[in-house]
Image (spheres, grey):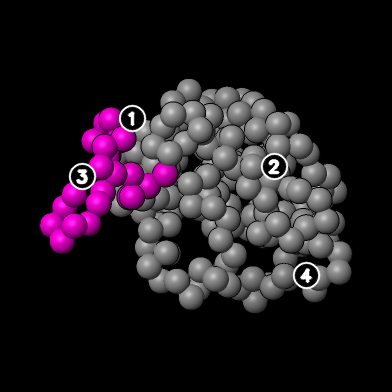
Amino acid sequence: MCLQIVEGCGRVMQVNFKGILMNKGIHLVGGNFFNFASPELSEYTIQDIARNLSHICRFTGSVNKFYGVSQHSIYVSLLLESWGYPVDIQMAGLMHDASEAFLGDVASPLKQLLPDYRKIEHKVESTIMKKYGISFPFEKVVKKADNAVFVAEREDLQPKCPQGLVYEGLTVERAPFKIVPWTSEKSQKEFLRRYFELGGVDK
C-alpha cells in the first residue's frame, strides 16, 4: 500500500507502508526495498542479491549468449580458491559485484563519466560489505582475479571484439577455464550454494 503526500510547491511524493520514500530507491521482488540515498536503511537478503545478479547480463548484454553477473562472481571466487587464497578472500571475490544487484551493471567507461555515480556505488558497496562482514576496500588480488575472468569472458563470449587486457602495465592472463553460460536459475542456485559453502550467514 502506498500513500501520496503533497509537499510544498505541489510536489508529490510516494511513501510506502513503512514510511520509506519510494523515489529514493527500488522495490525488490521478494518484498524488500533498497534505498539509494541511505543504503544502510535498506532491507535486503542474500537471496535478493543472488536473484538480481543472476538476471543481470555481463557486458551490458553484448555477449553471444546470456551470461549473468552471478556466474562471473562465482568464477572469480573459484579462481581465488585455486590460487590458494583463504575463505575470506574467496568470499570477497564472490561478493565483489554485489552492489550491481541494486545498481545494475554499468559499463566501466560510462562510470568514468559519472563522478556522482561512483560516490553512490562506493557507499552502496561499503554498506553491503559491512552487513556481510567482508573487508572493504577489497584486497588487490580480488581485482586481479576479476580481470583474469574478464579476459576469459571476452575471448569466449565476445570473440569478435578486441582481445587481451593490460592492467597497471601488466598483461593479464585469462582464467584457465572455458566460459559456458548457465541459465539464470542455475546461476542463482550456484551463487547461493557457493555463498553458504564459504560460511556465509543467511541474512
Under mark 2, the amino acid is Gln
Secondary structure under tag 2 reads helix
Residue highlighted by disc 1 = 1
Residue 82 screen position, x and y as percent: 72, 41
Residue 170 at x, y = what percent? 68, 72
- Label 3 packing within 10 angstroms: few (<14), some (14-19), many (20+): few
Tell us which disc is closer to us: 4 or 2. 2
Q: Residue at x 60, y 42 (%)?
A: 53
Q: What residue is pinned by disc 4?
A: 164
| Residue 95 belongs to the span the image colors magenta | no
In the image, the segment drawn in magenta is 2-26
Question: Given the current orientation, which residue lies at the most extreme left position?
Answer: 8
Q: Quadrant of the C terminus?
A: top left
The part of the image, by quadrant, that contains residue 168 is bottom right
Q: Nearer the viewer, mark 3 or mark 4?
A: 3
Which residue is the site of mark 3?
Answer: 5
Q: In terms of sequence position, does the residue under pointer 3 or pointer 4 come before the other?
A: 3
Q: Is residue 76 visible?
A: no
Q: Quadrant of residue 173?
A: bottom right
What residue sits right under mark 2 in the picture?
Answer: 71
Rendered view: 172 above or below 46: below
> Would residue 14 be counted in the magenta stretch?
yes
In the rendered structure, which disc, 3 or 2, sits on the residue that comes first in sequence? Answer: 3
Q: Are marks 1 and 4 in contact (CB under 8 Å)?
A: no
Rendered position, 43 above or below 38: above
Residue 104 visible in the current orientation: yes
Q: Quadrant of the N terminus?
A: top left
Q: Amino acid at mark 4?
A: Gly
